[in-house]
Image (spheres, rainbow, N blue to C red):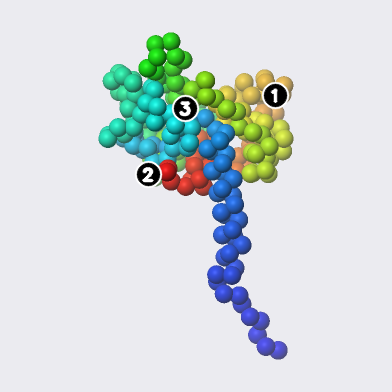
């Protein structure tokens, strides 16, 4: 009996490569169209990734921009607070299970005196090298992430997708439980399933994985 022919290595990799490309395209769309502004930066405030919402916000230079030395705020005092917070987050190390001690919030002044400040949520990412995820909420441009897209991308149930979407929108777990009319214990159980299906252990790590699939900042 003649030996079975093994397909060339390129033939076996093509379907897998195609699947990776499709997933990357879907996740890039999720980042660019649905999530709030997301920036990945190092301890020196130098961004290595920004989704479309973040790039548009940075281009307006309304409360946050990128200078030669990295991220800068509208005032010197805000820039100092931002860079100090990023350095602290980088020194914190990997996020912990409860996230409470590894999340920091900042409000940044904007150009218009009566404009609502930008809300930044900072969370460290597993390294090395140390990276910090910066979630930016500008209330007038906020768009919730479609739950159906999350369900398709990660194989989540409707309730898991609803919880994951609310977390990605910046809600705390206890608020998600209240808004979804479920107990906090049930919400934690759903969150555990979300992390298992996305192979992540924190909200920041989940969004960081989306950023990696989406590719470098353009």
Between residue 165 and residue 182, name the one nearer to us. Answer: 165
Please identify, in this view, whether the residue under mark 1 or under mark 2 is nearer the observer: 1
Q: Where does residue 27 sit, x and y in percent of width and height? A: 57, 44
Nearest to N terminus: mark 1 or mark 2 = 2
Of the 4 image quadrants, the one containing the C terminus is top left
Nearest to N terminus: mark 3 or mark 1 = 3
Q: Where does residue 45 sit, x and y in percent of width and height? A: 34, 33
Mark 2: which secondary structure?
A: loop
Q: Is residue 38 placed above or below 129 in the rendered structure?
A: above
* Residue found 55% across the figure and 71% down from its top: 9
Q: Is residue 144 left or right of residue 218?
A: right
C-alpha gap between disc 1 and disc 2: 37 Å
Residue indicated by mark 3? 136
* Residue found 67% across the figure and 20% down from its top: 178
Q: Is residue 37 placed above or below 26 in the rendered structure?
A: above
Neighbourhood count class around disc 3 (C-alpha, 10 Å): few under 14, some 14–19, many 20 upward: many
Residue 100 visible to an observer of this rendering: yes
Residue indicated by mark 1? 180
Q: Is residue 78 left or right of residue 32?
A: left
Q: Quadrant of residue 4?
A: bottom right
Nearest to N terminus: mark 3 or mark 2 = 2
Q: Where does residue 112 sit, x and y in percent of width and height? A: 40, 14
| Disc marking residue 129 | 2
Residue 121 visible to an observer of this rendering: no
């Amino acid at each position: 009996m003649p030996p079975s022919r093994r397909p060339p290595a390129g033939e076996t990799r093509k379907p897998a490569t195609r699947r990776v490309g499709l997933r990357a395209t879907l996740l890039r769309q999720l980042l660019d169209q649905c999530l709030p502004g997301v920036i990945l930066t190092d301890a020196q405030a130098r961004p290595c990734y920004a989704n479309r919402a973040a790039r548009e916000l940075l281009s307006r230079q309304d409360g946050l921009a990128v200078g030669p030395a990295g991220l800068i705020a509208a005032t010197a005092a805000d820039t100092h607070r931002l860079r100090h917070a990023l350095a602290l987050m980088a020194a914190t190390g990997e996020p912990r299970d409860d996230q409470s001690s590894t999340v920091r919030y900042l409000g940044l002044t904007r150009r218009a005196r009566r404009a609502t400040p930008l809300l930044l949520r900072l969370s460290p990412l597993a390294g090395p090298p140390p990276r910090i995820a910066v979630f930016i909420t500008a209330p007038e441009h906020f768009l919730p992430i479609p739950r159906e897209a999350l369900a398709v991308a990660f194989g989540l149930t409707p309730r898991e997708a609803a919880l994951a979407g609310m977390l990605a929108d910046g809600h705390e777990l206890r608020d998600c439980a209240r808004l979804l009319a479920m107990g906090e214990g049930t919400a934690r159980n759903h969150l555990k399933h979300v992390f298992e299906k996305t192979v992540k252990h924190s909200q920041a790590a989940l969004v960081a994985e989306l950023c990696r699939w989406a590719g470098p900042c353009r």
